[in-house]
Image (spheres, rainbow, N blue to C red):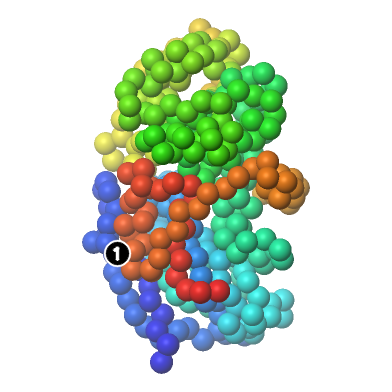
Amino acid sequence: MTINRQWLLSKRPEREVGPEHFEWVESAVPTPAEGEILVRNLYLSFEPAQRGWLNDLPSYVPPVALGEVMRSVAVGRVVESRHPDYRTGELVQGTFGWQDYIATDGSGMFPINRVPEGVPLTYPLHIYGLTGMTAYMGMMLIAEPQPGDVVVVSGAAGATGSVAGQIAKRLGCTVIGIAGGPEKCRWLVEEVNFDHAIDYRAGDVAAQLKKLCGNKVNVFFDNVGGEILDAVLANLAVGARVALCGGISSGYTGHSLPPGPKNYMQLVIRRARMEGFLVLDHFDRFPAAIDEMRQWVEAGEIRVKEDIVEGLENCPQTLNGLFRGRNFGKQLLKIAEA
């Protein structure tokens, strides 16, 4: 009998997430009912938002329930179909969770989509999926960079930040990335064409930023929050735009959160605005945006980097690694061969 391995949420973490917060279950592979497909998961996607889904707090999506398979977007192959719209052998993307197999009718929080022909199997999990679209919508609709602007991106070596910065560079901006460690900073400048990179582990971010562009930051695309947000607020230009994408420095715990930014009055002094956004509000723009992103990627104007861990047993540690800066590029986990 083929086994379906699953990670079920058993206890809500208060701070860091680990294997102790989940139950490892092995059971028979489900049988698809009429109108369902059976999907064999191949790759799982990891993003900081998953940690927030573990908190029993009001949010933009319901929390993962105790006893439920941990929620995650994945790509997989249809191994059996009793659904009129899907054929056995097709590659699909959906919210399939931390498990080997899922029987589903294709509905849910993020409806199933086919993996487009001619694209790498994993790309719908990032550059042509929620990650790439977050970078696109946040930069194009919220930050609105103009040619000649100075654009700063935190979490710049991650899947969202690296793409957001490259979009701004395409638009004629000077781009400064903030990342952790010399290897990531070197990659930003040498491989993805950022103008400058600041290593936040090397010391005072505000001082490094002031040296590069003091009080001239027109756009800040923030994935981090905390002290780095404060450092950039101190260097805003008049009329600056701050796009709040995430706050990974908080750990997304929902407990013992740090206080808000000390330098928020710079928004008044600099007549700037700070706006949060969710990519889920812009689903109607996805098809056109994905088409444009694909043109940029295939032309070599946008580069992507993947960090792939192997083994379903490593899911909890992989999620926690996002908050320790272990990932370099888009964090994925491979379960099986395509």
SS at mark 1 in the image? strand
User: How far across and down, in percent of the image, does residue 153 sit?
Assistant: 51, 30
Direction from residue 267 to residue 320 in the image, left or right: left
Q: Locate residue 98: give its quadrant.
A: bottom left
Observer-nearest of 305 and 287: 305
User: How far across and down, in percent of the image, does residue 266 sit?
Assistant: 47, 12
Q: Residue furthest front?
A: 190
Q: Is residue 126 above or below residue 246?
A: below
Q: How many numbered discs, if any?
A: 1
User: How far across and down, in percent of the image, does residue 161 sit?
Assistant: 52, 38
Q: Is residue 251 above or below residue 47?
A: above
For residue 306, say whether it is visible: yes
Q: Is residue 126 above or below residue 242?
A: below
Q: Locate residue 115: give its quadrant.
A: bottom right
Q: Locate residue 77: give its quadrant.
A: bottom right
Q: Residue furthest left?
A: 20
For residue 267, say whether it is visible: no
What residue is shown at x 51% (from left), y 25% (from top)? 196
What residue is shown at x 65% (from left), y 75% (from top)? 90
What residue is shown at x 52% (from left), y 60% (from top)? 73
Observer-nearest of 144 and 43: 43
Near mark 1 (Cα within 10 A), the count class, few <14, some 14-19 or many ≥20, is many
What residue is shown at x 58% (from left), y 82% (from top)? 79
Disc 1 residue type (three-letter): Phe
Q: Which residue is mark 1?
A: 22
Observer-nearest of 112 and 220: 220
User: How far across and down, in percent of the image, does residue 217 sit?
Assistant: 54, 17
